[in-house]
Image (spheres, grey):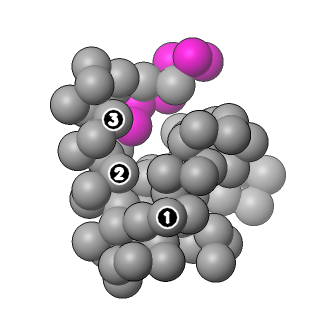
């Protein structure tokens, strides 16, 4: 499968774009990444998004565990 802008696919790229460029999302992800290992931080981040009723980026990419985890790779 071809990569999309260095990411596995469009969904991973779009979720990463939002998490790493939206100030509130970035601060939440950064805080979780400092406190927990990546897998746990990604699950907590996803649970927080879904718990707030946010299941997609404004561009329509679904927040999934794998896309959130991939977005958090370069946080720290």
Is the Cβ of the residue at disc 2 closer than 8 Å to that at disc 1?
A: no
**Are discs 3 and 1 less than 8 Å apart at CB?**
no
- Residue 52 location, x and y as percent? 28, 25
Circle 1 packing at 10 Å, graded few (<14), some (14-19), many (20+), is some
Instruction: Tell me: 41 left or right of 34.
Output: left
Using the image, determine if residue 55 lies above or below residue 21.
above
Assess disc 3: are there few (<14), some (14-19) or many (≥20) residues with their C-alpha within 10 Å of its C-alpha: some
Say which label, 3 or 1, has the lower sequence index: 1
Residue in the image at 27% along x and 71% along y: 40
- Label 3 or label 1, whichever lies nearer to me, is 1
Q: Position of residue 74 (x, y in %)?
A: 66, 72
Q: Is residue 75 visible?
A: yes
Q: Identify the secondary structure beneath mark 3.
A: helix
Q: To which residue does mark 2 refer?
A: 45
- Which element is circle 1 on? helix
Q: Is residue 19 above or below residue 61?
A: below
Tell me, for residue 31, which label it has, or none: 1
As helix, strand or loop, the secondary structure at mark 2 comes to helix
Q: How far apart in space, not on screen, are marks 2 and 1 (Cα)?
A: 10 Å
Q: Which residues are magenta?
A: 58-63
Report the residue marked by disc 3: 49
Q: Position of residue 56 (x, y in %)?
A: 42, 24
């Amino acid at each position: 499968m071809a990569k999309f802008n260095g990411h596995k696919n469009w969904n991973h790229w779009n979720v990463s774009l939002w998490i790493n460029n939206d100030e509130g999302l970035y601060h939440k992800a950064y805080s979780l990444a400092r406190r927990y290992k990546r897998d746990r931080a990604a699950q907590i981040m996803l649970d927080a998004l879904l718990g707030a009723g946010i299941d997609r980026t404004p561009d329509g990419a679904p927040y999934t565990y794998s896309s959130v985890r991939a977005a958090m790779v370069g946080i720290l």
